[in-house]
Image (spheres, grey):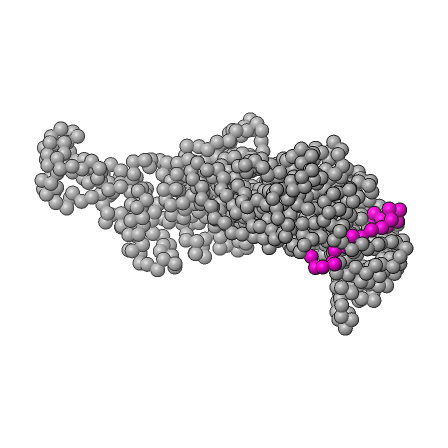
Amino acid sequence: MVRPARVGIVLDGPSLTDLASAVRAASSAWGGMYYPIIDLARQDDWRRTMEALAVDFLWPIMETPAAEEIARQVGWTWRGAKQFGAFAPPEADSSILHRVLRADEWIPTLAPDSLIAPNWADDDPLAALFSTWLGRIDDSDILSSERYLPTARQVSFASSEPLPSFTGSVTPIRLTASQIDYQGETVGSGVLVIDPGNVQNLIRFWNIRAAGGGVIPWPRGHDGFAEPLVRQWLESLYPAAAERTRERYINLEVIDSESDESPELLRSLLNEFGIDSTTASFAYPHGWYNRHPLMTEYVVDFSSTASNEDWSITASTPSLPFARKWDGWPGVIAAEVGIYRDETGPDRAAYAPRLRRISDFIVNADNMSPFQRATGEGAVYGLQASTKSVNVALLHPLDIFSTMFNKDDATFDQSDDGRFSTRLAETLGATITTAATQPAVRAVLMETSEHSEAGISFPHLLQIAERERGMWPDIFQRTTPKDYARQVVMWLLDRNLLRPVLPVKCPKCRNESLLDPDSISHTLICEFCSWRFTLGVTLGREGRRADWRYRLSGHVAKSKLKAALPVLATNAVLSAIKRSNPSLTKLDGLLIKSKDLEAEFDVAAIVDSTNPTVVLGEVKNSNKINAQDIANLTAAQAMLRSVNIDCYILVATLKQQLASEEISLLRELCERAPQVLHSDGLILPAVPIVWTGSDLSVPWSSEQHPWRGEDHWQGASSIALNSCKKNLALDAWGMAGGGPSDPRFAFAWQTD
């Protein structure tokens, strides 16, 4: 999808003149009505506000040191010198615009005579409000003189005159919202009672509208002007008088007055329309999930392939329907690239968590985007509106995880065991493979690794697969256990994990050799006694005892296989519980080395990329979890939480039941559980995810799969609590003290 860039306008203790400059800049840009304004002198939590509104970058209208420093921070930057800024004036050649796309490009799409150019006297008491409410065209802008003013109908506004008729007209600020379907978290509709000369009041009005609110101003002290304006607005909401008996609700907010009382005339008007005049203030958005709030209909599907050497893919971008032919650079828009299937392999990821500090890693191949950021489901790139495609960067998972930790004194790497399990997953068919959750697959591989010297006959392999099949075949396979067992063995042969060997005994010394197909010839030489003999004669003497056997491929080490199989099974289950992105971004064998921690984590996975959430895990085949494992996991969890990233500890084993000492360790870990950082307002403990062999050995379709637990849709927190109920005998949990920002939790455990 292509959409307007959403700019955060930065002010620092602004005057009304500074605010007017911000309004002129926003009024010139596509999407400008939805540009929030932050005043650094009054907003310490600007990051939360800008993230909640999905701002693409910040631009300082006031060139104070603080404003310019904020706009230079990683992930919030427009890359370009001042002459190539977000609102830079046109060069001598007006076909080359480095700035964001102008709103006046949409004038040809409007109904005839609908565009107006509002004007007022500079000394009018409501001049600042008119500017903030209606938008303001910059008369000194040559393109405004060429495009906007000749087309627009002049309409005069004055605080002392009746409200002019402009119903259905397009004001400068409304033009900036052309072709945009606002889909953000709603802040409601209503009336804002303000002091029209107070800059903070006007910023509040602007920001409510920028957040998608349907807000109408009531300037205090100007009831004669305000009453017909609000009446007209209410009539547009409730046109049928017969419906005025129905319960109605709007926001009503009064700011910066000696009392919270709304003007008497406003209360009377609201009562006339059957609206309670004591309704609440506007709520501000808490955040956004998945789709960007500024939606357009300009969407195109794409598919792209990448070779092993490629670190980017090409995404097509849709064209915007402008009448004017673009021969140069018309201005910058945002290309929101959503990726719904990623098969780039384990060493590259098309998804990065929605973190601003990852922005520097996703600079596209041509390095021409003035801004970019990760969204959790792809990326946003700034590009010229005439561009037909965009290069989307692919990232190495190790770069993603090291950036998430954001720890300068730490080094990150992938262990040899992690590299092996990654390649084993590829051999089994995919980066995330469900094969390792099948007990038959694990049993056949481990049994052949135990008999690599002698090999195992094909009938014996079938017996192992059928005996150890567990809950397979599942309801979707519609096959018999015997047929399923055969499918497993044949599949492993096809993946080249099992290889045939032919047992041949020397007729002289009776030493047995296992010959792979490539080493078989008509005449053989014994490796022990060097006797030369004929293969056919020897096979004839041995009869059925010379049948082919099968053993593990030589490149698969037994010890590594034993460690890797539970890791692969764990990744498969994690991929089923992830949220937001369709592919699990993960790294097996994450090594962290810092002054505070030196450890390896068998599993590192991002289970939610939009609200970044990491799972760090220790995975065992049959060994026990120990106190050092728990200490390492706890330390790494604290590192991520310190940079506002949710992290869940995971402990998994192929054993069917944990030992009593393991249960005690994990219960103690639960009782020290911190609060989940991002839980949509709920207060929840970040208890560990605890899985045993039964959790790692079930089909996705089974009701026993961890994903099928109670409240699974709530994400990792509910998955973790359900796992503790099943494997640690958690009976109940609740608050034990503390406040909402630092709660303490209590847990009750079932006893035998």
Q: Is residue 474 left or right of residue 100?
A: left
Identify the residue at the far bottom of this view. Answer: 242
Q: Main secondary structure of the magenta part?
A: loop
Do we see residue 112 in this rendering? yes
Q: Position of residue 296 (x, y in %)?
A: 61, 53
Identify which residue, 598 or 193, lies in the foreground. Answer: 193
Magenta region, residue range = 110-129
Identified at 39% across, 38% down, the residue is 423
Q: Is residue 109 magenta?
A: no
Question: Depth check: 85 or 709 in front?
Answer: 85
Q: Left or right of 618: which side holds 17?
A: right
Question: Which residue is drawn at the image coordinates 58% and 29% (left, top)?
Answer: 408
Report the residue at 52% width, 45% height from top.
315
Regarding residue 295, the answer to whether it shows in the image is: no
Q: Position of residue 524 (x, y in %)?
A: 14, 34
Residue 335 to residue 244: above or below: above
- Return the x and y of residue 545 as percentages of the image width and height: 15, 44
Quadrant in the rendering for residue 297 = bottom right
The reply to whether the magenta stretch includes residue 115 is yes
Q: Residue at the spot x=63%, y=52% of the render?
A: 323
Please tell me in which quadrant of the rendered image residue 658 appears.
top left
